[in-house]
Image (cartoon, helix red, strand yellow):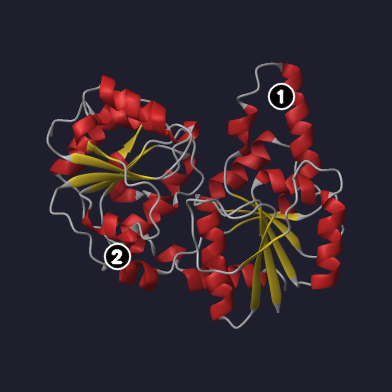
Amino acid sequence: MKIIQFINEISGGGAEAVLLRLHDGFVKRGFESQIVTLKPQNDYFSTSVSTTCLHLKKSALTTPAKIALFLKHAQPDMVLVHICDLHRVFSTIEYPNIFFVVHLELSYKLHTKNNFFSRYRFRRRIERTYQKHRTITVSHAIKKDMLSHFNLDETKIEAIYNPFDLEKIVRKSLEPLHTDEAFLLYIGRLVPIKRVDILLKAFAKIKNKTIKLVLLGEGPLKGELQKLASELHITERLIFPGWQSNPFRYIKKAKLVLLSSESESLSNVLVESLMLHTPVVSTKTAGAQEIMTDALQPYLAAVNDIDDLASKIDLAMQTYPEIRHTCYEKFHADRIVQQYIDLLS
């Protein structure tokens, strides 16, 4: 069986991480797996996985036809398309077993529209995009979100969690990290939806005034966040290593892993942290609530609430429940890859 995954570019985000893990899972099963991008690889992100670049623009009118021709020659049995902007491109392409993988709540974009006409137009665009091909959402929350905000066919939407290779995560976490300093950790893009500004303001309020905060990631807000850190007088306690090819060694040594997102479908970082038995604190996004259940619920903070996030960090540093395998076993890669293969039957 041949599987091709499409994404605009490989740039170190969560969707790219999922795509690469699926690729590994397919290869382990003995399938022919290929990753195809429209743009060349991002400068600060590197991967050993071979990719094919088509050098196409999403907005070009000829792009769907060129992709259709590529598929005709490649003849894959399954096509997985990641990222919503590419879904629009593929929505007009006629080819069997195309699946759109949705990594975020589409209602988040809907709520940014400031008038009835723009919201109506956005709804119609979403409904047109997802009416032909089948859809995979990376959480049950996203599936529920799509069905409650848009007029879509429920029978064409399947929720399948992101895959995680526990053995690989543990193995990579054992690589040395040469620091004895205690630190809290954020991993992710430095973009508005992640609300790292809220995290910095909460960090400035926690009781422990000596612990450091490590920010692993790159993005357009880096300069603004460094300026904010200076205004909050926490510059000396912040470390910006940038994007790292092995974040697991940081997760393993962190006192806490923190997320402050405004919206999050299913955070890779939360699951990876739990697999390494590192405590986590997150804002109460739909995805986080699917991961942080039962004894972990008290460590969910209200979205965009600086004081609540600070108090949850203080609580987690004081006491945290034992992290058991039941917290993450449903995300094991073997189980998830099989669910993808079952879609073809």
Q: Quadrant of the C terminus?
A: bottom right
Q: Position of residue 224 (x, y in %)?
A: 40, 26
Picture layout, residue 34 above or below residue 189: below
Element at badge 2?
A: helix
Q: Quadrant of the N terminus?
A: bottom right
Q: Position of residue 23 (x, y in %)?
A: 57, 69
Residue 130 visible in rendering: no
Horizontally, is 234 left or right of 24 in the view? left
State the image quarter where residue 203 is shown: top left
Q: Which mark is residue 72?
A: none
Residue 321 visible in rendering: yes
Residue placed most toward the observer, 93 or 54: 54
Horizontally, is 219 left or right of 293 in the view? right
Which residue lies most toward the bottom here?
A: 30
Residue pointed to by mark 2 = 173
Q: Position of residue 214 (x, y in %)?
A: 27, 43
Picture layout, residue 179 above or below residue 340: above
Residue drawn at 32 percent across, 57 percent down: 274
The three-letter amino acid code for the residue at tag 2 is: Ser
- Category of crowding for the residue at label 2, using alpha-carbon neighbours closer than 10 angstroms: few (below 14), some (14–19), many (at least 20): some
Element at badge 1?
A: helix
Residue drawn at 81 percent across, 58 percent down: 67
